[in-house]
Amino acid sequence: MGIRSAAVLVFFATCIFATVSASKCACRSLPCGPSNYTFYLHNTVYNPAVDNADNFTSVYGLPPNVTWPNPFSFGVTSTFEDPITVGPARDSQQIGVANGFWQIDSKQSFTLFHVFTANITEGEYKGIINIIGQLRESDPVRYMTVVGGTGDFLGARGLASCVLVVIDRTPPATWTLSFDLDLYY
Ligand SMILES: *[C@@H]1O[C@H](CO)[C@@H](O)[C@H](O)[C@H]1NC(C)=O
Ligand SMILES: *[C@@H]1O[C@H](CO)[C@@H](O)[C@H](O)[C@H]1NC(C)=O
Ligand SMILES: *[C@@H]1O[C@H](CO)[C@@H](O)[C@H](O)[C@H]1NC(C)=O
Ligand SMILES: *[C@@H]1O[C@H](CO)[C@@H](O)[C@H](O)[C@H]1NC(C)=O
C-alpha cells in the first residue's frame, strides 16, 4: 500500500470514527419527567413591627441612600425561602421549598429579575427545577424560563407561566404565586 492509499484509508477511518462518535452523542437521551407541572409559592415578608420572626419567608435588601428620586425602588432585593404547595391555599400540602431572590432592575417600572430553585421533595416527582426570568409586575401572566433541573426534572427546559394569585399588603405583607410549567427534555 502506497503512502497515498494509506492516507486515504486514514481519512476514511477518521470519518467513520467521527460518524460513530457523532451518532453516539445523538443517541444520548434523558428519561422524561413530567411535561406539565404546577405549584404554588407563598411569601411572607419579614417585618419587625409585627414581630413575625417565627414565620417570615423573605427579607428585603435596600440600595444605598440615593440622591435622585427612586419611584420604582431600583436596586431593592428580596431574598426568599418560600414553602411550595400543591394547591393555592397556604395550608394545602407542602411539597417543597423555593430558594432564591428577586431584584428590581428597572428605573421605569416595577420590573424584577427573578431567579430561584424549586426543591420538590414530596409527590410523584422529586428533584430541583431552576427558574429564571424578568418579571413585570403589571403583567397578568409573567413568563419565565425553566433552564434546568435535577432528579425527575433532569434536563428540563421550558416555560414557567407565573400568576399572582393573591396579595395582602397589610404588614407584614403576604402573597401567593402560581407556576404552571411546560417542560421539554
Ligand atoms: C398534566 O396535564 C394533564 C392533562 O391536563 C393532567 O391530567 C396531569 O395531572 C398534569 N400533570 C401534572 C404533573 O400537573
Ligand atoms: C405569623 O405569625 C404571626 C404572629 O404570631 C401571626 O399573627 C400570623 O398569622 C402568622 N402568619 C402566618 C402566615 O402564619
Ligand atoms: C440614609 O439617609 C438617611 C436620611 O438622610 C439617614 O438617616 C441614614 O442614616 C442613611 N443611611 C445610610 C445607610 O447611610
Ligand atoms: C432539598 O430539600 C431536601 C429536604 O429538605 C434537602 O435535604 C436537600 O438538601 C435540598 N436540596 C437543596 C439543593 O437545597
Image (cartoon, rainbow, N blue to C red):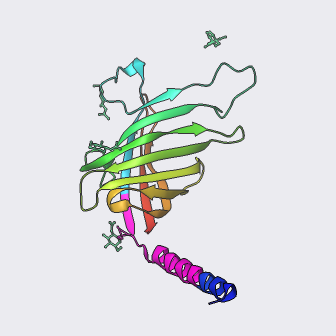
Q: Is residue 32 magenta?
A: yes
Task: Please give left or right for residue 92 compared with residue 144 in the image.
Answer: left
Is 69 placed above or below 125 here? above
Residue 107's x, y, as percent? 71, 37
Pick whichever, 3 or 139, lies toward us.
3
Is 91 placed above or below 80 here? below
Identify the residue shown where x is 35% and y is 20%: 51
Is 43 placed above or below 159 here? above
Pick whichever, 11 or 167, lies toward us.
11
Picture quarter with ligand 2: top left
Identify the residue shown where x is 60% and y is 86%: 9
For the record, the magenta segment spans 13-38
Q: Is residue 27 magenta?
A: yes
Residue 151's x, y, as percent? 33, 58
Pick whichever, 83 or 129, lies toward us.
129
Residue 39, quarter of the rendered image: bottom left
Residue 123's x, y, as percent? 24, 58
User: What is the quadrant of the N terminus in the image?
Assistant: bottom right
User: What is the quadrant of the C terminus in the image?
Assistant: bottom left
Q: Residue furthest front?
A: 1
Residue 86, quarter of the rendered image: bottom left
Task: Please give left or right for residue 120 compared with residue 147 in the image.
Answer: left
Residue 181's x, y, as percent? 43, 62
Identify the residue shown where x is 41% and y is 18%: 49
Is 11 placed above or below 143 here? below
